[in-house]
Image (cartoon, rainbow, N blue to C red):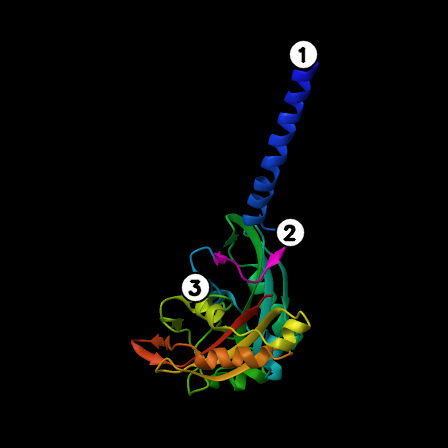
Amino acid sequence: MMRFFSRLVLLLSLVAIGLSPAHAQKKLKYPKPEKDKVYDAVEKPALPEGGLEAFGQYLADHQNYPTAALQRGVQGTVTVSFVIEKSGDLTEVAPIQPGDPDLDAEAVRTVKAGPKWTPAMHKGAKVRQRMSIPITFQIPADAGSAAATTAPAPAATAAPAAAQATVPAEKSTPTVIAPDQPARPVGGTEAFFAWIQQNQKYPALAKQRKIEGRVIMEFIVQKDGSLTDIKPVKRLGAGLDEEAIRLLKAAPKWAPASYKGQPIKQKMVLPVVFQL
């Protein structure tokens, strides 16, 4: 009886040992996302409730030009960074590069007051994702006299940009308008970022130094869909900035923005993500 019991224990031990490598391999093959990690690139990016166009319209409708900035004749673009939590709430809302305090404060206020987002999905689970949007403040041509008074400030126009967002249109005149249809990659935003990842060549120096992150790029989508005026507005160095420029110069054309049925130029800001 004792011999039978010893054999049974040995058999069970061997079975357990035999199952362990397969179980460990399964965990390695399907790792779960880290609980509190903030992702830059995910399988399914976060989206504002109602979609990107609705969020851009929200910004255009609710953004106010600070009176103090208007009086001083200050204008420009504030790129706001934030984290979309698993709940869809926005946290860590702040300008990437602080500039005029009045414009920065208004850009942050507008983003914080916005609707919830649908959280990002990665490896089958909800994850936290960091995104950024540029918010443009530009004084219309007919507001020049108002800059010296305390008249009500005109609303600025803006729309989101990140892995898959757009920004307000630029025209040859000083007036800023929101396009009826924003510029967008042919085939969709996800296809465009997939193209970026497939054609990306990680610089050797950046690999050696283990540098990763986002190069924030600015460019203009022309009326014919070509990308021009390409430049980084937030750099990483070690050859990553140059690689981001090369990728956008080689990228497929976009469908241009339109206003009242006519194509118009549109300034865009989006991140090119580098991950080792």
* Left or right: 255 in relation to 124: left
- Residue situated in front as seen by the camera: 257 or 225: 225
Disc number for residue 190: 3
In primary-sequence order, the first of circles 2 and 3 is: 2
Q: In the rendered image, which quarter is residue 202 located in? A: bottom right
Q: In the rendered image, which quarter is residue 206 located in? A: bottom right
Identity of the residue furthest to the left in this view: 261
Identify the residue shown where x is 52% and y is 81%.
245
Quadrant (top left/top right/bottom left/bottom right) for the C terminus: bottom right
Residue 240 visible to the viewer: yes
Q: Which residue is mark 2?
A: 36
Question: Is label 1 in contact with label 2 (beta carbons under 8 Å)?
Answer: no
The Cα–Cα distance between marks 2 and 3, rounded to whole angstroms, is 24 Å
Mark 2: secondary structure: loop
* Left or right: 153 in relation to 10: left
- Amino acid type of the residue that numbered disc 2 sits on in the rendered structure: Asp
Question: Is label 2 in contact with label 3 (beta carbons under 8 Å)?
Answer: no
Q: Which residue is mark 1?
A: 1
Mark 1: secondary structure: loop
